[in-house]
């Protein structure tokens, strides 16, 4: 399963959403602080959207560990946040669960406050750690995903 995680992140770095999605089980559940919980095709479409629209996206991954049931990895992403044009360097801890040789659950943990400080600037530094900001961000990211899916 370690190879599956490595394939997933190599594909992300290459912006190869098709290969990334082939690593996911049909019943995938993805969770992160920016999108919240996404299931099945919504999770797969999020990666399609990020691969297609990500400006200057570059990633690196390490500390990949896995057995037949679970896995984890550390990864970093560098990109330009499209709404502000600001550079972001996000540091992420990922956890995985596997079923039928595929990823069935993928949870990304990162500091939304740190991310907001980089992506938005002083307003992000001020509000990025609040529940209000997190709810607003999830609403915006899911609206972007809805538009992507509809197009």
Image (cartoon, grey):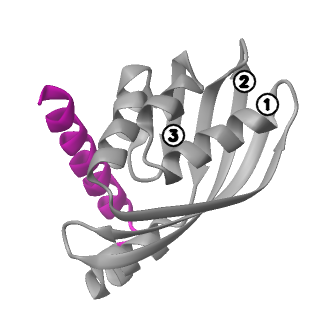
Q: Position of residue 40 (x, y in %)?
A: 44, 20
Pick the front one: 121 or 12: 12
Element under disc 1: loop
CB under 8 Å between discs 3 and 2: no
Element under disc 3: strand
Residue 98 is labelled as 2
Residue at image position (30%, 60%) is 132
Q: Earlier in the sequence, mark 1 or mark 3?
A: 1
Q: Position of residue 124 (x, y in %)?
A: 32, 77
CB under 8 Å between discs 1 and 3: no
Pick the front one: 128 or 27: 27
Name the side, left or right, on which 91 lies relative to 40. right
Q: CA distance from mark 1 to mark 3?
A: 20 Å
| Residues shaded magenta | 128-151
Q: Earlier in the sequence, mark 3 or mark 2?
A: 3
Q: Earlier in the sequence, mark 1 or mark 2?
A: 1
Residue at image position (35%, 37%) is 48
Closer to the observer: label 3 or label 2?
2
Q: Quadrant of the C terminus?
A: top left
As for residue 99 lying within the magenta part, the answer is: no
Closer to the observer: label 1 or label 2?
1
CB under 8 Å between discs 1 and 2: yes
Pick the front one: 116 or 92: 92
Q: Position of residue 65 (x, y in %)?
A: 84, 45
Q: Which residue is mark 3?
A: 31
Q: Badge 3 local density, few (<14 within 10 Å), some, or many (20+)?
A: some
Choose top left, top right, bottom left or bottom right for residue 2: top right
Q: Which residue is mark 1?
A: 1
């Amino acid at each position: 399963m370690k190879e599956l995680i490595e394939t997933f992140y190599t594909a992300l770095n290459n912006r190869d959403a098709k290969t990334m999605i082939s690593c996911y089980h049909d019943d995938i559940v993805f969770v992160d602080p920016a999108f919240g919980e996404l299931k099945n095709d919504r999770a797969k479409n999020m990666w399609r959207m990020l691969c297609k629209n990500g400006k200057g996206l570059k990633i690196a991954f390490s500390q990949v560990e896995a057995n037949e049931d679970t896995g984890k990895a550390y990864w970093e992403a560098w990109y330009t946040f499209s709404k502000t044009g600001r550079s972001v360097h996000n540091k992420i801890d990922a956890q995985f669960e596997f079923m039928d040789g595929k990823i069935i659950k993928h949870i990304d943990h990162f500091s939304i406050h740190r991310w907001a400080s980089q992506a938005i600037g002083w307003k992000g530094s001020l509000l990025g750690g609040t529940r209000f900001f997190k709810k607003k961000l999830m609403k915006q990211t899911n609206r972007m995903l809805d538009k992507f899916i509809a197009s």
